Amino acid sequence: MKVPDSLSIAAKTTLKRIFASKSYAGFPALLSAHEHSPLLSRRRAEIISSRVRLVAGAFAVLTPLWIIIDVLAFPWPIMAMLMAGRIVTSAAFILLALYCRGSSDIRIAYRGMAAMFAIPTAFFLFSHPLLSHYQMAGMADAIAAGYAFLPFVMAAGLSVFPLTAKEGLAFATPILLSEGVVAVMQVDMLSWSSHLGAFWLLFLITSVATLAGMSQLSFMSVIVEHSARDSLTGALNRLSGVDLLDFLFHLAKRNDEPLSVVFFDLDNFKKVNDFYGHTEGDRVLARFSSAVKKNMRKSDLLLRWGGEEFILVLPNASCDIAMEKVAQLRKQGFGLRPDNLPQTASFGIAEYTADNAKTWDELVAIADLRMYQAKSTGKDAVVGCGT
């Protein structure tokens, strides 16, 4: 084995141990958000939005309070310009706090976080060059020097959020660039070694903060997935499933995309529990769920609705696609019962545009009714949209 291969394997193993390799999200999900489940994305968006709002609210108050220090430390022309900059910055933070109201949309969370870092970056690009072109002494010089550390504070702020490696790099890039812009503007005032030293320190702080965010994300993924899953089947429990179904329904309406649900019930399951006991019944449920999950897309969701009832949520799937999915599932099979007979199920399909459903629960009710129609035809049947 080549030495580089050995080092690569060792590095990956170490990182997986650091970032809770037993988490449902897995190591790839710590690198990119594309690997996240819809549930994790929703919960993460809520946390990011709430923390952006908290930070924005705090800085909306703290930023203008610093005007007192500026008044005491700087002469009139500089003090007036800094005061104006702080007022504008505080107003921007107030607007941001009003914008981020606990949204569960990850895109809104991204925009809020980008704005949260852009606002102080803009203030840094305005204030630091302004102060550096004036000769100061004493308290004024000390306070002016403190303005140079604003990018370091912003970089450290990345650790507050549960972020992937790519997200940490994306949000840190403007901060690093602002430090580079200031270095170019002051190239005739400080040596390149001073600027490179500051940039290197900023990069190290950014890296550590991003690792802290990834650690948060790893821990969060474990908590979210464990609390949201049915321990027997691995499907989403009803409480979490309803929350996600409501979100996906509104998302489909907003984007004018199809959304299908498949309501299915295991046939003659009560006989398994009555004749073979609940332990065998649990095994049938687990095998059934495993078979369904093998044919799911990353965007699909499997909910355990109750007992032997399940709902398969198919985002951006028409009635025809949902029918094809059910046909694939039935062809594959759902495992054997304790009497060695194949386990079957009855299916009802509904799609919100085709069935003109106004809410997610109305959509589920339509699919549920069709499932009972399938039962009434002799079980092991499918009743689709428009039936």
Image (cartoon, rainbow, N blue to C red):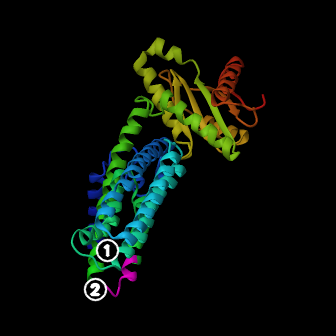
Height in image: 272 above or below 221?
above
Q: Where is the C terminus found, in terms of image quarters? A: top right
Q: Judge depth for marks 1 and 2 and give the one in front.
A: 2
Q: Label 1 vs label 2: CA separation?
A: 13 Å
Q: Say if the magenta span includes residue 148.
A: no
Crowd tier of the residue under label 1, counting other residues whose Cα lies within 10 Å: few below 14, some 14–19, many 20 or above: some
Crowd tier of the residue under label 2, counting other residues whose Cα lies within 10 Å: few below 14, some 14–19, many 20 or above: few
Q: Which numbered marker is on residue 199?
A: 1
- The residue furthest front is 76
Residue at position x 33%, y 70% in the image: 75
Residue 216 x, y percent position in the rendering: 33, 48
Horizontal side of residue 359 vs 121, given as left or right: right
Q: Which residue is mark 2?
A: 191
- Residue 145 lies in what quarter of the image? bottom left
Say which label, 1 or 2, has the lower sequence index: 2
Residue 57 x, y percent position in the rendering: 42, 47
Name the element at disc 1.
helix
Q: Say if the magenta span includes residue 188.
A: yes
Range drawn in magenta: 182-189
Name the element at disc 2.
loop
Height in image: 275 above or below 243?
above
Res 207 seen here: no
Q: Which numbered marker is on residue 318?
A: none
Type of residue at label 1?
Phe
Residue at position x 75%, y 32% in the image: 355
Type of residue at label 2?
Ser
Residue 369 x, y percent position in the rendering: 69, 21
* Frontmost residue, 330 versus 244: 244
